[in-house]
Image (cartoon, rainbow, N blue to C red):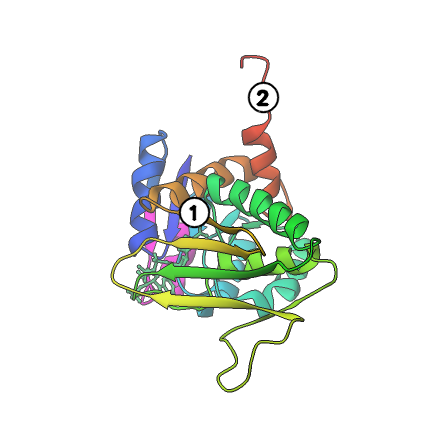
Amino acid sequence: MRIALIGYGRMGQAVERVATARGHTVVGVMGRATPNAERTAIAETADALIDFSHADAVETNIALALHTARPLVIGTTGWDAQRDALAQRVQQSGGAVLYAPNFSIAVQLYMHYAVALAAQLLRLDGWDVAIEEIHHRGKADAPSGTARALTQRLQHALNPPREAVYPAPPNHPLPETQFCVGVLRVGSEFGTHRVLLDGPYDWLEITHRAKSRDGFAYGAVRAAEWLRGRTGFYTFQEVLTEILTPTEAD
Ligand SMILES: NC(=O)c1ccc[n+]([C@@H]2O[C@H](COP(=O)([O-])OP(=O)(O)OC[C@H]3O[C@@H](n4cnc5c(N)ncnc54)[C@H](OP(=O)(O)O)[C@@H]3O)[C@@H](O)[C@H]2O)c1
């Protein structure tokens, strides 16, 4: 597959490494300063576009994918407020876009099981929960897209419901009806997410820590392979189901 990259920073370079190892070719790279005509020309040489750039660029990147009729995988985070409107535009235009705030297969499974465990324990008396994320200093958005997704899923799963707060209230105690999302920025940390559970007799910390960026890149490349020939606005869930479903050869 011929792949064009939008954004050639830490993640763009990881995607190039992983895509090349899977036998694909990176045919072009678009940066902040790439003129529109050149962006269109690069996109037209590609079978798929993969975007790890900046939230401000996502709307333009979707417009490019629709204009050139190329499938687009988006890993860029921090554009949740625009997501529903842009998804609708993709559906109406017959385009193909797949977005995940975290393309790590392990993180997706982690979120599923951590939320299920938290929801079960919080049905018992005396349990509390918090989420923490730690990333490198260069990260542009906070909380991370993954922490937001984890928070949303937890909010849906909790009964009675609790509202997430970020940051912690600066001058009053945390009400029983809320839970905290904590954010730290330090050095070159690839990404750590933690669900903290505090019970009357037990303390649980369920942690995922990325060892490199290649796990995110691998998921994004698998998503680009999956998206080929499809139309619609997708999440990583469909790709994950395909990756995790045993085949006859297994
Ligand atoms: N979904 C996932 O699994 C996952 C995993 C990790 C990171 N992310 C997200 O991916 C994004 C990129 O992360 P990163 O660590 O690779 O950041 P990064 O190292 O800062 O790289 C971002 C790149 O995008 C370029 N860029 C900025 N605006 C652009 C535009 N309008 N058009 C094209 N390129 C543009 C930047 O160019 P300049 O240098 O010229 O500004 C830079 O090369 C972030 O939103 C991050 O949260 C997602």
Q: Is residue 172 above or below residue 75?
A: below
* Residue under the image location 56 percent in, 52 percent down: 201
Q: Is residue 122 magenta?
A: no
Amino acid carrying label 2: it is Pro
Mark closer to the chain start, 1 or 2: 1
Which residue position holds label 2?
246
Q: Residue furthest left?
A: 187
Estimate the x, y position of residue 198 in percent, counting from the top left: 54, 57
Q: Is residue 41 magenta?
A: yes
Q: Report the image quarter containing ligand 1.
A: bottom left
Q: Is residue 164 above or below residue 29?
A: below
Q: Residue furthest right?
A: 160
* Residue under the image location 29 percent in, 66 percent down: 137
Label 1 and label 2: CA atoms lie apart by: 24 Å
**Residue interval drawn in magenta:** 28-43
Tag 1–tag 2 contact (CB < 8 Å): no
Estimate the x, y position of residue 236 in percent, counting from the top left: 56, 44
Which residue position holds label 1?
208
